[in-house]
Amino acid sequence: MPDFFYNGAGRLRSVWRLAAFTVAYMAATSAGFVGVDVAAALVLPPATYRWLLIESWLGFAVQSIVLFVPAALVGWGCARFAEELPWRSLGWAPHRGWMRDALFGLLVGAAAVCLAALVGLAAGGYSFRLVGGADAAAVARTLVTSAVVFMLGAAAEEMLFRGYPFQTLLRSWPVWAALLPVSLPFALVHLANPNVAPGFTFLNTALAGVWLGVAYWRTRSLWFPFAAHAGWNWAQGAVLGSPVSGITKITPDPLLRFADSGPHWLGGGAYGIEGGAACTLALVAATLFVWRTRLLSATPELRQYTDGENPNPDAGVAPSVVRADAAAAGAGARVHLVYLRPEGMLITKKQYADWRQIQDEHENFMTSLGPFDEEDVLDFFENQYGADEARWGVTRAEIRRFMASDETTLSL
């Protein structure tokens, strides 16, 4: 029975899972920073220590690694022990289409910040110029090293804010409600950055959190929001020459030189593009694009991990009670869709207590969905693969014939 601590799936409620993650993550991260600081101070000469961790871009890289590792390990531990979900549920493992998502994310992120730059340019506040006689080697070094730093930073922030905390809320909350508890802290931590723009730093970073949260929700994978985040920062700092969240140390020799002649409410001033209304407009447009585009979709496996709670069989809860994919109980056959490696699928009428039983039965098991009735199956194929049956691997008539027959399995 649901109570204050446990939900109808027999799992600890998502708000308590989020609290457990937060406490464990803060403890692990604090220990990580202290450990790195003490170890570096003991091993390195003072001048080298100061240069490595304080003055150079390497300090940002080390910081990102120390933030990423606990977020990944604590998130994995919470998923495993609180919800019995695998590492893949975090959306960080390679999956079908992950490379496409990453490349598209880079393009979307860079295009979004360029849109903000165009708004500022059209308003007369921004100017960009190539520096005559610029050191090509220094520019190339900035382009390369900043790409590494921005990728590490994006990986850390995505794992922390769009990783387990966001995902565990999605399993029991609507997406709009789950966005708030992760987007607001994402904005708050950026208020510690230099050259904060009053009002706009918080607003735009919160909007960026919503944009990246929607990016995760559309793909149920961290590859797309990670790449969009990294592409935005790299294009903004290394290419356009703007401060990135008030920071210029990472991109000392950008491709272009950036200047903002005001007004600062539009352009962001010393905080950079992210500190003004031009960025606000670009983020709203980018969020609407990611939300509506048909170029993004989630694999059935990844949808299964976040579309509902994973029932606890030890609590005597049947999957059909809580899975968002499961239809209400009714007459007629009910089936599971079973995805098999490398490309196979089957529809089975066999009844299972949970997905582990299906996994035990199929050596090449990848994921499963259901239980579904006939209309659920047809709706799933149409939503996932389009109305053209040629893309399904099976026809509507064949599905209806199978559902009405005594056969137990239909292989596609």
Image: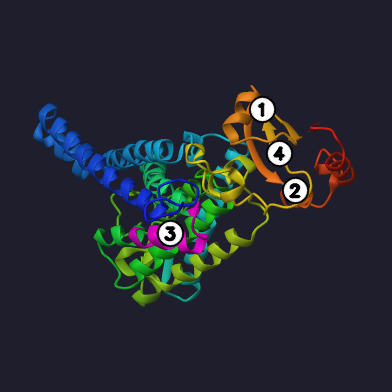
Nearest to the eye among marks 2 and 4: give it: 2
Distance from the alpha carbon under mark 1 to that under mark 4: 13 Å
Label 3 belongs to which residue? Answer: 209
- The answer to whether 209 appears left or right of 193 in the picture is right
Q: Mark 2 or mark 1: which comes first in sequence?
A: 1
Dot 1: element: loop
Q: Give the residue at x 59% y 35%.
A: 355
From the image, tell me which residue sits under label 4.
Answer: 337
Answer yes or no: is residue 141 visible. no
Pointers 2 and 3 in contact (C-beta within 8 Å) = no
Q: Nearer the viewer, mark 3 or mark 1?
A: 1
Q: Main secondary structure of the magenta part?
A: helix
Q: Residue at x 49, y 71 (%)?
A: 281
Q: Closest to the observer: 279 or 337?
A: 337
- Badge 2 element: loop
Could you tell whether 56 is left or right of 362 in the image?
A: left
How would you rate the neighbour count of disc 4 (Cα within 10 Å): few for under 14, some for 14-19, many for 20 or more?
many
Q: Which residue is mark 2?
A: 373
Q: Which residue is mark 1?
A: 341
Q: Please identify the quarter of the rendering in which residue 153 is found.
A: top left
Question: Which region of the structure is painted magenta?
Answer: 170-185
